[in-house]
Image (spheres, rainbow, N blue to C red):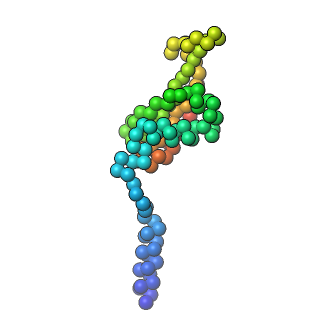
Amino acid sequence: MKALAVICILLVAASIASPQGYVPKSGFVPDSKTARKIAEAVLVPIYGEAKIQEEQPFTAKLEGDIWIVAGTLRCKDQNGKTLSGEHCMGEVAVVKLAKSDGRILSMTHYK
């Protein structure tokens, strides 16, 4: 009887410790559209909707198993004229997330 109780406890412990559920073969973040949506979802509460909208469109590039999502820098002079890259100063958000499970690996806002 004790052996049966020990086996039952071990089976319950094993079922709790092992992951359950569906895991997609291509990961939970399979494409750039999904990566961009996740990045925007975590950026908005921190930097605000207006700031993140200013950085649209966001680009997502897969490097190995990590998505790197970055905003677009928009620069204008005092008259509202768009400046070229070498004269453009500002900041842009960058989020790195795991393709396999969507973990946020880092989130920064560069200057």
**Residue 92 in view of the camera:** no
Q: For this view, does 20 lie left or right of residue 50? A: left
Q: Residue at x 64, y 35 (%)?
A: 48
- Where is residue 87 shown, x and y percent of the image? 55, 12
**Vertical placement of 16 versus 53: above or below?**
below
Q: Nearer the viewer, residue 98 or 47?
A: 47
Q: For this view, does 79 lie left or right of residue 13? A: right
Residue that extends furthest to the left in the rendered view of this protein = 25
Residue that extends furthest to the bottom in the rendered view of this protein = 1
**Vertical placement of 51 versus 65: above or below?**
above
- Where is residue 12 shown, x and y percent of the image? 45, 74
**Residue 43 in view of the camera:** yes
- Where is residue 35 shown, x and y percent of the image? 46, 39
Looking at the image, how many numbered discs can be counted on the residues? 0
Q: Residue at x 37, y 39 (%)?
A: 64
Q: Residue at x 54, y 37 (%)?
A: 40
On-image quarter of the N terminus: bottom left
On-image quarter of the C terminus: top right
Q: Nearer the viewer, residue 63 or 51?
A: 51
Q: Residue at x 43, y 70 (%)?
A: 14
**Vertical placement of 88 versus 70: above or below?**
above
